[in-house]
């Protein structure tokens, strides 16, 4: 196990606030990375997606890199611009 993973485990065990914040941040990062990868797989630029859904390139960048409290309708529009759909799973 890497030093980073050991550090994260240790901090999560010692701080409930850190654990909650880390897990939420990680989930946000994962969502943004999934969106970006889907866009790249579709061969589209951020500008092309922005144009397709009627927004600015900066909004697409924020969605992919700093996702927080995003509307589901925005993610649906993003997916439609890629010719895809979203699926929601409660686990």
Image: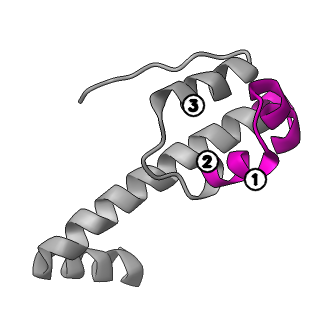
Name the residue beneath numbered marker 2: 63
- First in residue order: circle 1 vs circle 3: 1
Could you tell me residue 37's position as x and y percent? 68, 40
Picture quadrant where residue 20 is located = bottom left
Are the residues at dot 3 and dot 2 in contact (C-beta closer than 8 Å)? yes
**Residue at disc 3, secondary structure:** helix
CA gap, disc 1 and disc 2? 9 Å
16 sits to left or right of 75: left
Task: Judge by depth and name the residue closer to the eye, 21 or 71.
Answer: 71
Stretch of the chain drawn in magenta: 41-63
Q: Residue 21 location in percent, x, y? A: 29, 67
Dot label at residue 74: 3
Distance from Cα at disc 3 to Cα at disc 2: 9 Å
From the viewer's side, name the closer residue of 53 and 35: 53
Q: CA distance from mark 1 to mark 3?
A: 14 Å
Determine crowd level at label 3: few under 14, some 14-19, many 20+ residues with C-alpha closer than 10 A.
few
């Amino acid at each position: 196990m890497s030093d980073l993973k050991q550090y994260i485990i240790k901090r999560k065990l010692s701080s409930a606030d850190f654990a909650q914040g880390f897990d939420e941040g990680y989930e946000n990062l994962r969502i943004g990375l999934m969106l970006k990868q889907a866009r790249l797989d579709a061969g589209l630029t951020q500008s092309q997606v922005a144009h397709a859904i009627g927004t600015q390139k900066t909004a697409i960048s924020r969605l992919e890199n700093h996702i927080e409290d995003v509307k589901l309708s925005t993610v649906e529009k993003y997916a439609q611009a890629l010719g895809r759909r979203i699926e929601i799973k409660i686990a």
